[in-house]
Image (cartoon, grey):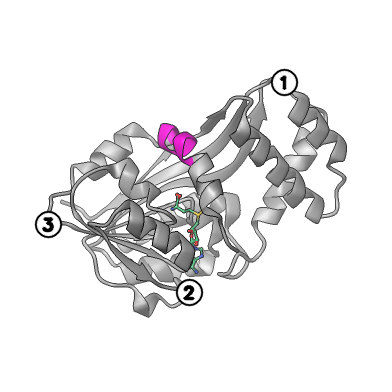
Amino acid sequence: MSFTAAWLTLREPADHAARDPALLDAFRARITPATRILDIGCGTGSTLRAVNRPARWTLADRDPALLTEAAQNHPQAETLRIDLADLSTLPTADLVTASALFDLCSPAFITDFVAHLGRRTGLYAALNYDGMMEWSDPHPQDGAVVAAFNRHQRRDKGFGPAAGPEAAQILAARCEGMGLRATLAPSPWLLQPGPLHTAFVTGVAEAAAATGIDTQDWLAARLASRGSCRVGHLDLLALPDG
Ligand SMILES: C[S@@+](CC[C@H](N)C(=O)[O-])C[C@H]1O[C@@H](n2cnc3c(N)ncnc32)[C@H](O)[C@@H]1O
C-alpha cells in the first residue's frame, strides 16, 4: 500500500489540529537535543513538524519518494529506508514515534514490534483510526458504508490482516504487558466541507465499494452535503516508568 505526498500534505493540517495536546506535551517533556527519536512510517516528516522540538531525529520509511521529500523538508534529520516487516533493521532509539501507521499493521506485527521496542523505549503513536465516523447531517447509508469501510481497513496492508480500528487498543495492551505506562486519548478529525472532506469521502466510498456494497448514491449525497464530519482516531503515549 502506498501513500502520495499530495495526500499526506492535504491531511496534515487536520492531523496536527487533531493530536491530543496533553499527550503531545507529555511526549515533548521527554525530549532534549540529545534524544534519539526514530519516526517510523515517517512519510514527509509530519510527526517531526508536529512535535517541533530539536533532537537527533531519524525519519524512516519504505517509500523512497516520501523519504526524498522528508530529507528536503528536514535536512538536519537523518533519513533511512526501511521495511518495518523486518524489525531487525530498526536502529536503536530513546523514543519512537509514528502517526497514522498502526491501523495498517496486523495484531501479530504490533505484538512483535512492542517486544522489539522493549521496556526502556518510549512510544508516541498518534492518529490511529478507531472506526468511528459521524456526520452532522446523517444519511441512511452511513452505517452500512462505515461498517464496510472498517471491514476493508482490516485487509492486509503489507503486515498481514490489519488491526484496523482495534489497533490503538491492541498497541496499548501490548505496551502495558511490556511494563510501559500507556495512555490513550481521542484525536478526532473535525472535517468541514472542502478538499480533505471530498478526498476522504471519495476514498471511503471506494474502499467500501471494494467489499461489494453500492456506494454511488451515498457518495453523491456526501459530496453535495454542507455538513461536517468527525472521524475518530486515538493517540497513544507509552513511557517507561520513571
Ligand atoms: C498513512 S502514512 C503516514 C505518514 C506520516 N506518518 C504522516 O502522518 O503523514 C503511512 C506511512 O507508513 C509507511 N509504511 C507503510 N508500510 C511500511 C513498511 N512496511 N515499512 C516502512 N514504512 C511503511 C508509508 O510509506 C507511509 O509513509
Measured in 3D between alpha carbons, the distance from the residue under mark 1 to the one under mark 2, in whole angstroms, is 41 Å
Tell me if label 1 and label 2 are in contact, CB under 8 Å: no
Q: Is residue 100 magenta?
A: no
Quarter of the figure that contains the N terminus: bottom right
**Dominant secondary structure (helix, strand or loop) of the stretch shown in magenta:** helix
Q: Which of the 4 quarters of the picture holds residue 24?
A: top left
The residue at the point 23 percent across, 55 percent down is: 240
Does the beta carbon of the residue at mark 2 sit less than 8 Å from ligand 1?
Answer: yes
Measured in 3D between alpha carbons, the distance from the residue under mark 3 to the one under mark 2, in whole angstroms, is 28 Å
The residue at the point 64 percent across, 40 percent down is: 200
Q: Is the residue marked by circle 2 packed among few (<14), some (14-19), or many (20+) residues within 10 Å?
A: some
Q: Mark 1 highlights which residue?
A: 137
Q: Which mark is residue 81?
A: none
Region rendered in magenta? 12-18
Tell me if label 3 and label 1 are in contact, CB under 8 Å: no
Q: Position of residue 87 (x, y in %)?
A: 39, 75
**96 sits left or right of 55 in the view:** right
Q: Amino acid at mark 3?
A: Ala
Q: Mark 2 highlights which residue?
A: 85
**234 sits left or right of 179 in the view:** right
Where disc 1 sits, the SS reads: loop
Tell which circle, 3 or 2, labels the residue nearer the N-terminal end.
3
The residue at the point 60 percent across, 62 percent down is: 162
Mark yes or no: residue 123 visible. Answer: yes
Q: Amino acid at mark 1?
A: Asp
Q: Amino acid at mark 2?
A: Ala
Going by the picture, which residue comes out furthest to the front?
A: 72
